[in-house]
Image (cartoon, helix red, strand yellow):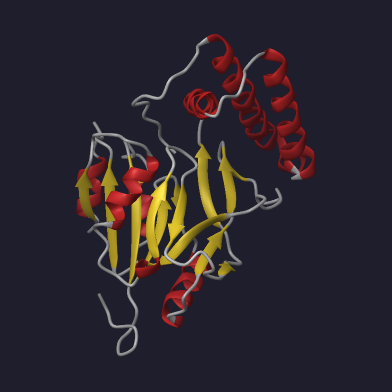
């Protein structure tokens, strides 16, 4: 690891994967400016690991799934750089954002950097949608990042909770829903995990609760976050997110979910 006082700070970009052969090359190519690229694979049955190795990434296979937080913690243990940026396999770093990341690392600042997304759904970039409400922390000084917690929608735990948070101006491209079929699969997986989380929190399910959640989320995305400006692709994106909200409460009521080894992809 570089000495920030005497040398140039270094950057690791870490990626979690599971059966991402169709897009891992695009993801790693966008991360090529980093000093180190680490892939933690959940036990892919396709060529994900071979492709990642061919592109110069350090690949570690960890098939005993214990949640996204644990996979990220395993990734942290492999980092040999002053800063770490977490990138999902369905994301791409545009050149403008890459320049911002390089500048942040070069600063040596004790801070956390937050990103926002441009969603790419069904072949269209939904750039006219408003930013997500809070963004997500993605760039950390390695010596300030203790661990991650949470099965899905995991969060970082910092050594100093008062660490300042900066915002990147440019957005990641998030290829979250490339096909309708894939979007339906993702909806079902995340509805299941959402139901498990609510069951653990003592929440109740039901059709009416699901309808209320789905309606409020569709209105928020389609109207207030301007999904209606993104054509049919924007409508489909907002609808699938709303359906996920509905079915997590239906699952909670009728399937009585319990925590297990449910494995999902981003």
Question: Farthest residue in the bottom direction?
Answer: 6
Question: Vertically, is 182 above or below 152?
Answer: above
Question: Farthest residue in the top direction?
Answer: 254
Question: Vertically, is 23 above or below 242?
Answer: below
Picture residue at 29% right of the left edge, 70% below the top: 81
Residue nearer the viewer, 90 or 230: 90
Question: Vertically, is 173 above or below 3?
Answer: above
Classify the position of the N terminus by image quarter. bottom left
Residue 56: quarter of image: bottom left
Picture residue at 47% right of the left edge, 70% below the top: 101
Q: Would residue 47 appear left or right of 185 to someone viewing this image?
A: left
Classify the position of the C terminus by image quarter. top left
How many marks the image carries: the answer is 0
Q: Would residue 85 appear left or right of 131 to someone viewing this image?
A: left
Residue nearer the viewer, 229 or 82: 82
Q: Position of residue 38 (x, y in %)?
A: 27, 56
Q: Would residue 220 appear left or right of 236 to someone viewing this image?
A: right
Picture residue at 38% right of the left edge, 41% below the top: 68
Residue 34: quarter of image: bottom left
Q: Position of residue 228 (x, y in %)?
A: 76, 39
Q: Position of residue 174 (x, y in %)?
A: 52, 47
Residue nearer the viewer, 3 or 19: 3
Picture residue at 28% right of the left edge, 47% below the top: 40
Question: Farthest residue in the front direction?
Answer: 202
């Amino acid at each position: 690891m570089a000495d920030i006082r005497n040398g140039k700070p270094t950057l690791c970009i870490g990626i979690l994967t599971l059966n991402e052969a169709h897009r891992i090359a695009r993801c790693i190519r966008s991360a090529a400016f980093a000093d180190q690229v680490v892939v933690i694979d959940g036990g892919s049955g396709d060529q994900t690991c071979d492709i990642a190795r061919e592109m110069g990434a350090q690949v570690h296979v960890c098939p005993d799934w214990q949640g996204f937080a644990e996979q990220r913690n395993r990734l942290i243990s492999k980092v040999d750089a002053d800063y770490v940026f977490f990138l999902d396999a369905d994301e791409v770093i545009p050149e403008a954002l890459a320049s911002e990341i390089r500048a942040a690392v070069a600063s040596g600042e004790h801070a956390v950097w937050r990103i926002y997304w441009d969603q790419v759904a069904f072949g269209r970039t939904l750039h006219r949608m408003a930013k997500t409400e809070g963004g997500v922390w993605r760039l950390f000084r390695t010596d300030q990042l203790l661990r991650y917690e949470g099965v899905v929608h995991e969060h970082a735990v910092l050594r100093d909770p008062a660490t300042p948070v900066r915002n990147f101006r440019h957005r990641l491209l998030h290829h979250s829903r490339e096909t309708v079929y894939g979007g339906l699969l993702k909806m079902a997986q995340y509805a299941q995990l959402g139901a498990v989380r609510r069951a653990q929190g003592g929440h109740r399910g039901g059709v009416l609760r699901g309808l209320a959640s789905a309606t409020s989320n569709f209105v928020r995305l389609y109207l207030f976050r301007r999904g209606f400006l993104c054509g049919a692709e924007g409508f489909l994106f907002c609808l699938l997110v709303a359906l996920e909200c509905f079915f997590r409460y239906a699952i909670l009521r009728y399937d009585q979910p319990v925590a297990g080894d449910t494995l999902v992809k981003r």
